[in-house]
Structure formats: C-alpha cells, structure tokens
Image (cartoon, rainbow, N blue to C red):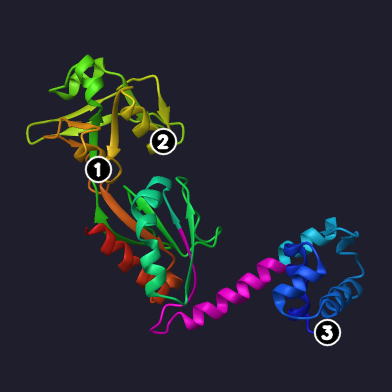
C-alpha cells in the first residue's frame, strides 16, 4: 500500500464527507478511494470512518488520525515549497497574519494586484489583533504595529511608519468644545483601546514637554473600528492610527485635534514591522510580500 496516497485519500474523504466527493476532487475512481481507506483501517486494526447512506464521518479514532495525517501532509507540502521557494519566481502558499483593521483597510484593497502579479503564489491571510506564535501557528510572516518583538528566534524588519491622531466628530466638538491642551481631555469622553485587559494612558510629547494622561470614558474596545464608529457617531474623542481615519478627516467626518503633539510617542510605537522566522530568510514568497507591503505603504 502506498501510505502517502492512502493518507491523502483518507484526508480528502473526511474533508469532503464521502468517498464519491473525495474521488471527484482527486480525479480518481470511487473504488480507488474506498480501497485505500479500507487498507488503512486494516493496517491500523481500527475503524476510521462511520458510513451511512447519506454521509461519512470520522470515528473518534478517525478524527485523531485525520488531524495527525493532515499535519503530515501539510508539513510535506511545506517542505516541498521551502525547497522551491529559493527560486526566482514566488510560488506556493504563504501564510500571513495581520491586525484586523490594518488588513481590511490597508491590505485588502490591493491584494488582488499581488495575486495577479504572482499567479503561482497562494496567500492565506489571517486577520487577528492577538499576538501570533509564528512557529506554533505555522505563520510565514506577521505584520505588527508598534513595538517590535524581535529576538534571536524572530527576525523583525521595519517597513513603514504611522502616526496616532486624536479625532472626534464635528458634532461632538461643537457640544463639548475643542481641547487646546492635552489636560483638557480629562474633561472629555475618551474612547479607549483595550490592550488585552490593560488600560494604558495617552502620552503627548511636544518640543516643550511630555504629558501622560489617564483619560476616562464609558466605551473601550479591542477593535479600533468600533472606536472609529463611535467617534463618527459623536460619542467622544478617539486615539486612532492615521491609516484608519485619514480619509474621515479629509472628508470632514472627523476632526483632528492637538495636532502639534506627538501622541503615544516612542522609538518603536509608530513602526510597522514584519516578523518572520530565520528559516524564511531568502524566501521568495516572503520577499515579494514585504515588497508589496512597502509599495502600498508608500502611497
């Protein structure tokens, strides 16, 4: 028995929910798939699939075997890609993790151009504001905003910068007044970002001084667009990235205040970094995606 072939047919049977569907996807006969899966069950001495007239589902043992088999097949495909990845042409699957709103607002409008330019490149784009374990989650490249997490085990490359702006709707400012000094925000409703349950103050720096404020407000969220929508609705002052609200400011939907201050300043706070593992150094897939990011960030 060709074990690799049998694993492939078993995995597709579970994914497709039946022998016939798996056979159609693989371009083989249904009897071939049935025979290979039966051979696996005989070799293992265990039933892997529950078969009914309507569908086919894995047994408890089959589910555990499916997860292991899927890992093996994915690892093999990754090994093949890693060898081919040193070629001049970017090809194969690239797994990328990016912050939710950055992915939606900055990357999504341009991703089609990347796919058109590299027809042999497959991109798996995961949107998450959580810290990504590159090795455990098998991520090839991660985009992080703010402080870098570079270490001996992770390569960090800065690809751009952004600013954080204090913004509010014209209606809110008409009622609550325009703050002319950072301290005035202590008397405003402030829409705050939730850093994994930690409240962080807003820091303002000018050539003359540096001010840290523990602003307060009735709404906090771990999603920046929630705060943006609340600001648009006149609910208060928000501290948000320029790439998220620049168009709103241009269109007059939001107004930037305290523009003469650098907000939440720090050497790395305004950096956009890409992170990847050392074994991806020289990867053509990673290189073209980094170049793609640098291009769209230069607009």
- Residue 92 part of the magenta segment: yes
Q: According to the image, label 1 marks what residue?
A: 247
* Mark 1 or mark 3: whose residue is earlier in sequence: 3
| Image spot of residue 170 (x, y percent) | 22, 25
| Residue 80 horizontal side relative to residue 284, left or right | right
Q: Nearer the viewer, residue 159 or 253?
A: 253
**Cα distance in 3D space between marks 1 and 3:** 61 Å
Q: Is residue 149 visible?
A: no
Residue 36 position (above or below residue 13) = below
Indicate left or right for 163 with 207 as reference. right
The residue under the point 40% across, 75% down is: 118
Position of residue 271 relative to residue 241, above or below, is below
What is the number of the mark on residue 1?
Answer: 3
Q: Secondary structure at mark 1?
A: helix
Does the magenta run of residues contain 258? no
Report which residue position mark 2 lands on: 195
Q: Secondary structure at mark 2?
A: loop
Residue at image location 81% in from the left, 65% down from the top? 18
Quadrant housing residue 150? bottom left
Q: Which quadrant does the C terminus fall into?
A: bottom left
Percent coordinates x, y for residue 128 in the rendering? 47, 48
User: Going by the image, does 140 lie left or right of 88?
Assistant: right
Instruction: Give the residue drawn at x 42%, y 84%.
Output: 87
């Amino acid at each position: 028995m060709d074990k690799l072939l049998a694993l492939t047919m078993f995995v597709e049977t579970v994914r497709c929910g039946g022998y016939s569907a798996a056979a159609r996807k693989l371009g083989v006969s249904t009897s071939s798939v049935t025979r290979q899966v039966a051979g696996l069950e005989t070799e293992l001495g265990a039933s892997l699939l529950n078969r009914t007239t309507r569908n086919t589902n894995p047994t408890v043992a089959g589910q555990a075997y499916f997860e292991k088999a899927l890992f093996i097949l994915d690892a093999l495909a990754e090994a093949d890609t890693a060898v081919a990845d040193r070629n001049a042409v970017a090809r194969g699957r690239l797994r990328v993790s990016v912050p939710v709103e950055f992915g939606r607002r900055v990357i999504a409008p341009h991703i089609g151009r990347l796919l058109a330019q590299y027809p042999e490149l497959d991109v798996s784009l995961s949107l998450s504001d959580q810290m990504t374990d590159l090795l455990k989650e098998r991520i090839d490249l991660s985009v992080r905003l703010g402080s870098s997490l570079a270490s001996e085990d992770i390569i960090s490359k800065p690809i751009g910068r952004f600013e954080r702006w204090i913004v509010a709707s014209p209606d809110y400012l008409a009622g609550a007044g325009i703050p002319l000094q950072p301290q005035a925000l202590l008397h405003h409703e402030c829409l705050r970002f939730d850093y994994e349950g930690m409240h962080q103050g807003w820091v303002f720096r000018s050539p003359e001084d540096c001010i840290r404020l523990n602003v307060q407000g009735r709404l906090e969220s771990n999603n920046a667009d929630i705060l943006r929508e609340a600001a648009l609705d006149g609910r208060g002052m928000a501290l948000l990235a320029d790439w998220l609200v620049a168009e709103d400011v241009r269109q007059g939907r939001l107004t930037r205040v305290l523009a003469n201050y650098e907000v939440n300043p720090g050497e790395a706070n305004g950096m956009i970094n890409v992170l990847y593992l050392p074994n991806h150094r020289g990867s053509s897939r990673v290189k073209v995606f980094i170049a793609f990011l640098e291009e769209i960030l230069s607009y």
